[in-house]
Image: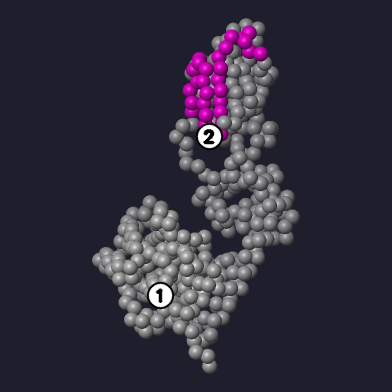
Amino acid sequence: MAKKQNLFDRFKENLSQKGLATGHQRILLAVSGGLDSMVMARLFSKSGISFAMAHCNFSLRGKDSDLDMAFVEQTSREMGAPFFCKIFDTKKYCMEAKLSVQEAARELRYLWLLETARENDYELVATAHHLDDSIETLLINMLRGTGIRGLAGIPEKTGNIIRPMLFAPRKDLEDYAREQRIEYRLDKSNLEEIYLRNRLRHKVVPILREINPGLDSVLQDFFDRMQATADLFDREVESEKARCIENENVGISISIAALLNHPVPGLLLYEFLRHYQFSPTVCRQLFDSLNGQPGKIFYSKTHQATKDRKKIFVIPLHPKEEQQEYKIDRVDCEIRHGKACFTFELKPKEFVETYTKEGFLACFDADKLLFPLTLRKVKPGDRIIPLGMKGKKKVSDLLTEKKIPVHNKFGTWVLVSGSRVIWVAGLRTSEDSKIDQGTRMVLSASLTDA
């Protein structure tokens, strides 16, 4: 029977075979002080690769958190490695971001690690996730009803974050720490079974290893196959994006006809929308609505998706804008808002060469206007007397007739005199402010892209 390679040789081989890191790269190690990260630090130290140690103090375990930080700092000095640390008020962040403690700690950790690496010219960030972590992640994903990516466990590389220890089960790390007399800190929270991951770690995974003593090898091969399958699937999705999706001025649009022409349109829609934080449930509801009336809106935490006649429009949810209204007096002025540029000019009628009844250039009898005018976004209930008509018309009906997509309707600008809408920018002007034979002064308004 062939002798098993020692952990250090397997570590070097894994770095090389998977293309995770080279000897010329500088790597920032995420080190908690626990078994996994302390073994990783020792392996990097023996490898000769340039590295620094970064420690997150989440202020969750009282004095123990501070002792962990001091231990990692002392170890970095002994190894001659630069040391970075950050103390977080995790509980406060939990409340502000409305996240669980575990979610908040993970978010804070990765944001800080990436920022620290960037600011100090480290090309990669390494975490000490090992094979047991990947097995537990697989089980958690399955319990939550995962897709193909969830079956691949923890990825070995995400952007410039590498996980070079995924080849090794925790037992191998324990054996190596004992052989090399590597000191590490114990986190008692890893023993508490209130967390799902801990219950799987201490109860379920040991039973699976008892049922199949070769579980580690079997699942390593399984993760590789699932990752290859996920990569193949991603290429198919990217190909379909080119066929179904167009970039809009704001957000994207998905062709409903092109989507429904795919053999599994519901799955494809989810793949298009998951990057915008839409849940599987919301994606199913949206898909079920495709044969219904246009106008229904679906939300994620960051975006809204509107089902229109032929397309699904996906746009970001913006915070409420501070400036939604502008005042225009009897003077020439220019107003810029995002990409929109409005120009207002006041001049005698004889100097106005042309004007349009509707569209991006409009002219008004200045003496029929109540200054200052208000330029703002359209509101529900707004009405206008369109040029050439006698009765009022809802601006929303006008937008519908002009086939303005639902998601764009409340991004339309209107010019208001007193309580009267006199211009739906880019579309129509009003009858009650038109130029006639008695007009002396004209206010011209134009809309262009800035």
Could you say which is closer to the camera, residue 70 or residue 281? 70
Answer whether residue 341 is magenta in the image: yes
Residue 304 position (above or below residue 162): above
Q: Residue at x 52, y 62 (%)?
A: 158
Q: Main secondary structure of the magenta part?
A: strand
Q: Of the residues shown, which amino acid type is indicated by label 1?
A: Lys
Q: Farthest bottom residue?
A: 1
Answer whether residue 344 is magenta in the image: yes
- Gap between marks 1 and 2, in whole Å? 54 Å
Q: Which residue is mark 2?
A: 338
Q: Which dot marks residue 46?
A: 1
Q: Farthest left residue?
A: 63
Residue 36 position (above or below residue 3): above
* Number of other residues with Cα within 10 Å of mark 1, as a class: few under 14, some 14 to 19, many 20 or more: few
* Contact between labelled residues 2 and 1, with CB atoms less than 8 Å apart: no
Q: Earlier in the sequence, mark 1 or mark 2?
A: 1
In the picture, measured across the screen, residue 166 lies left or right of residue 312, that is left
* x, y percent for residue 112: 40, 57
* Number of other residues with Cα within 10 Å of mark 2, as a class: few under 14, some 14 to 19, many 20 or more: few
Q: Which dot marks residue 201?
A: none
Q: Residue at x 65, y 7 (%)?
A: 437
* x, y percent for residue 410: 57, 35
Q: Nearer the viewer, mark 1 or mark 2?
A: 1
Q: Of the residues shown, which amino acid type is indicated by label 2?
A: Gly
Q: Which residues are magenta?
A: 325-353
Could you say which is closer to the camera, residue 208 or residue 23? 23
Q: Is residue 296 visible?
A: no
